[in-house]
Image (cartoon, rainbow, N blue to C red):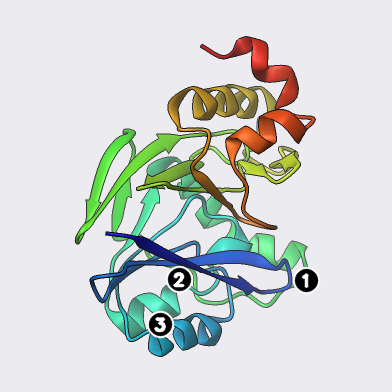
Amino acid sequence: MNLIVETVKTGPFQENTFIGWNSNSDGAFLVDPGDDAHLIIDVIERNSITPKAIINTHAHLDHIGAVQHLKEKYKIPFYLHTNEKMILEMYEASCKMFGIVSNPRPEVDIWFKNEGELIIDKFRFNTLNTPGHTPGGTCLQIQNHIFVGDTIFRGSVGRTDLPGGDSTLLESSLIHLLNSMDHDFTIHSGHGPDTTLSYELSKNPFLIPLKNKLN
């Protein structure tokens, strides 16, 4: 089974929403549907796929704005790490701080906590706890793809100056990610282009100093 991943840039922060499905099946999953639900729905309808669940890497305002609309439209569950409860509850205040009109705050159906295997319909994810950008930041690996949210970007890493951020924790999480995942898997970040851990270890100024801390 080959996993197909399509990226939809959404909202004023140009956040990456991801839609994934297997080439031999019409079932799909949504990762971090941040805004512009109509753009996400266009991809779903164009490819004749059926969303089975929404799973988020974290709950910042630019990653959850379209969740509730899509949950209700497709009658599907929303998965989120339990340590993101604080971030989720700050949604309306965060929107106000950035001058953005808030959408309905999404209701979480399934909270997860322990890293490991997470099976959603026919999709088998490996979850990795990567706090630092937010308290419950999570990387989601499926086949040769890793959805990392705002943990790492091409040439940079997630900011830690917002409520719940912790730069020491983020460094530990980056080391955990590098020690746990294949460095040639495709990294899908919450903003910007795809990358790989191999590329980031050679080019990313935040990761190059971590080389001597790897197993």
Tag shown at residue 7? none
Q: Mark 2 points at which residue?
A: 67
Corner quadrant of residue 107: bottom left
Dot 1: element: loop
Q: Which quadrant does the N terminus fall into?
A: bottom left
**At 46% across and 33% down in the image, what residue appears?**
182
Using residue 95 as the reference point, say whether residue 139 is left or right of it: left
Dot 3: element: helix
Q: How crowded is mark 2: few (under 14 residues within 10 Å), some or many (20 or more)?
A: many
Report the amino acid beneath label 1: Gly
Dot 2: element: helix
Front label number (2 vs 1): 2
Report the amino acid beneath label 3: Ile
Viewer-side residue, 63 vs 165: 63
**At 75% across and 41% down in the image, what residue appears?**
156
Q: How crowded is mark 1: few (under 14 residues within 10 Å), some or many (20 or more)?
A: few
Residue 4 to residue 37: above or below: above
x%, y% of residue 184?
52, 38
Q: Distance between the residues labelled 2 and 1?
A: 20 Å
